[in-house]
Amino acid sequence: MSDLMPSRRRGRRTALTARTARIGTAVAAALAVAASLTAASTASAAPSPRAPGKASAKASAGTCDAFGTIPMGKYYVNNNLWGQDSGQGWQCAWDTHRSGDTIGWGTEWQWSGVSHEVKSFTSAVLGWHWGWQSDATELPVRLSDNRSVRTSWRYAVSPDPGTMNVAYDLWLHDRVAEDWEDQPTDEVMIWTYRSGGAGPLGQKTGTVNIGGATWDLYQGDIGWKVHSFVRTSNTTSVGLDLNDFLRALQQRGSVSPAKYLSSVQAGTEVFTGAGRLDTSAYSVDVG
């Protein structure tokens, strides 16, 4: 979760409560349809790399529907437009390839409206999400088990993509989560790229060095705790053990080792603007 203007955070908790029900119902319905049509698919045709997002998605196995989903093995791509009511525009997502546990996918957007409100978080989802729990993900895992969560992500961002970020979004629960009614206790974001003045929720509480890079840590609360690690310089190629970030929070006393990592998501939060994210290779391996 992000907040472009921290002084305007008040009043967001009610909207986020409504968001959980809306996402849960929409994602469950979309995945039920998508799974019945494409569960046996292991690959799909890539859209033209220079075609407009709407045309590309409609012509391929993609989607321009809010909360539309694309199954990709143990992951699925979710066109999560949870904040679209705060603006006007569109966003599409598509898959390009899958080889084992490595996938390629893309998204394109055009959003206007309230400048400090997130419109979307189109992402690749592994594990729990409101309305769905994928199979064969190795999640959830208890933090005290100290299992590695290794990930690799290579992507390209279009020039002048607007106000946005590229980030991992990890969700924690205090028990094994099964459906959207299981409210998370913590959200851990890992920002690897940002543009247009996008900033995280909360206040800066420290700086850490993880994975050969420096990250500023911000912490806030929107009905669950939000911990955001923001890389001090942008990158388009990532190789990390996400458990390093979870351990850093445990060492600071911010997160209990008794909690469970239930979901790993990776995508782009968009506030406003027009742009595109193309993922050439993405994978997560829970050790």
Image (cartoon, grey):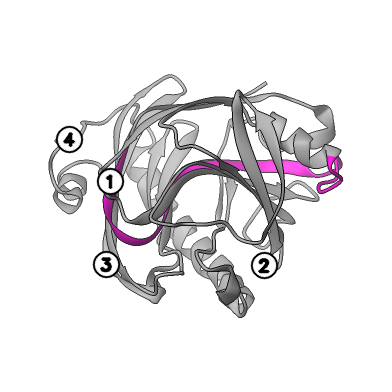
Residue range highlighted in magenta = 252-278
**Other residues around mark 1 within 10 Å, as few (<14) / some (14–19) / many (≥20):** many
Across and down, in percent, residue 137 comes to 59, 32
**Residue 268 is a magenta residue:** yes
Kindly indicate the quadrant of the structure image that contains residue 46.
Answer: top left
Q: Which residue is mark 2?
A: 222
Mark nearer the N terminus (2 vs 4): 4
* Count of marks placed on residues: 4
Q: Which residue is mark 3?
A: 89
Foreground of the two, 175 or 119 = 119
- Separation (CA) of disc 4 from disc 3: 21 Å
Residue under the point 61% across and 33% down: 214
**Residue 49: mark:** 4
Mark nearer the N terminus (2 vs 3): 3
Q: Which residue is mark 1?
A: 276
Examine the residues drawn in magenta and state their main secondary structure: strand
Instruction: Identify the element where label 3 is drawn.
Output: strand
Mark nearer the N terminus (4 vs 1): 4
